[in-house]
C-alpha cells in the first residue's frame, strides 16, 4: 500500500473473526497448486510472501511449488523457534497435538 506497492492478503478462512489487515483481503483456499498458480498469474503477482501459520505445511509446499513453476520470487516469513526460549529446557516436547 505504501511506496506504490500493491498487496493482497489471503486468509485461509479458519478463524471466525480475523484481525483486519491493510489492503484487499481474500478468504478461502486456492484449490491446490494449480489454483494458486492461476491466482498468481491472473493477478499478475510479482512476488509472493508466505507468512502462513507454521502448521500450514500444505500451503508452504504449494507456495514453493507454484513459485518454482512460475519462476516467481518467494519470501517466507517464519517466527523463531520456541526452542530458543530460556524456559524451553524445562518443557515437555511432543510430536503432535494428540
Image (spheres, helix red, strand yellow):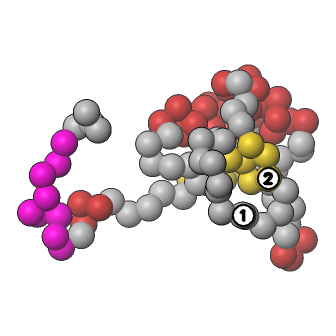
Question: Magenta includes 76?
Answer: no
Q: Quadrant location of residue 1?
A: bottom right
- The image quadrant where one finds the C terminus is top left
| In this picture, residue 40 sits left or right of residue 12 | right
- Give the label on residue 78, or none: none
Q: Residues within 10 Å of mark 1 (few under 14, many from 20)?
A: few
Vertical relation: 77 (above or below) 39: below
Which residues, given as a range, are shown in magenta? 86-94
Residue in view at x 17 percent, y 64 percent:
88
Q: Residue furthest front?
A: 16
- Give the label on residue 20, or none: 1
Residue in view at x 22 percent, y 37 percent:
95
| In this picture, residue 6 sits left or right of residue 55 | right
SS category of the residue bearing label 2: strand
How far apart are the alpha carbons under marks 1 and 2?
A: 9 Å
| In this picture, residue 73 sits left or right of residue 93 | right
Q: Is residue 65 visible?
A: yes
- The percent position of residue 89, horizontal first and vertical second, equals 11, 63
- Give the label on residue 25, or none: 2
- The percent position of residue 39, horizontal first and vertical second, equals 82, 35
Vertical relation: 64 (above or below) 82: above
Q: Is residue 74 visible?
A: no
- The percent position of residue 3, horizontal first and vertical second, equals 86, 76
Amino acid at each position: 500500500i505504501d511506496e506504490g506497492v500493491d498487496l493482497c492478503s489471503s486468509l485461509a478462512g479458519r478463524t471466525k473473526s480475523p484481525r483486519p489487515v491493510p489492503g484487499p483481503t481474500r478468504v478461502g483456499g486456492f484449490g491446490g497448486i494449480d489454483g494458486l498458480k492461476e491466482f498468481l498469474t491472473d493477478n499478475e503477482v510479482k512476488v509472493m510472501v508466505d507468512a502462513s501459520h507454521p502448521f500450514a505445511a500444505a500451503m508452504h509446499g504449494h507456495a514453493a511449488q507454484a513459485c518454482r513453476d512460475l519462476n516467481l520470487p518467494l519470501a517466507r516469513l517464519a517466527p523463531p523457534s520456541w526452542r530458543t526460549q530460556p524456559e524451553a529446557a524445562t518443557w515437555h516436547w511432543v510430536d503432535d497435538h494428540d
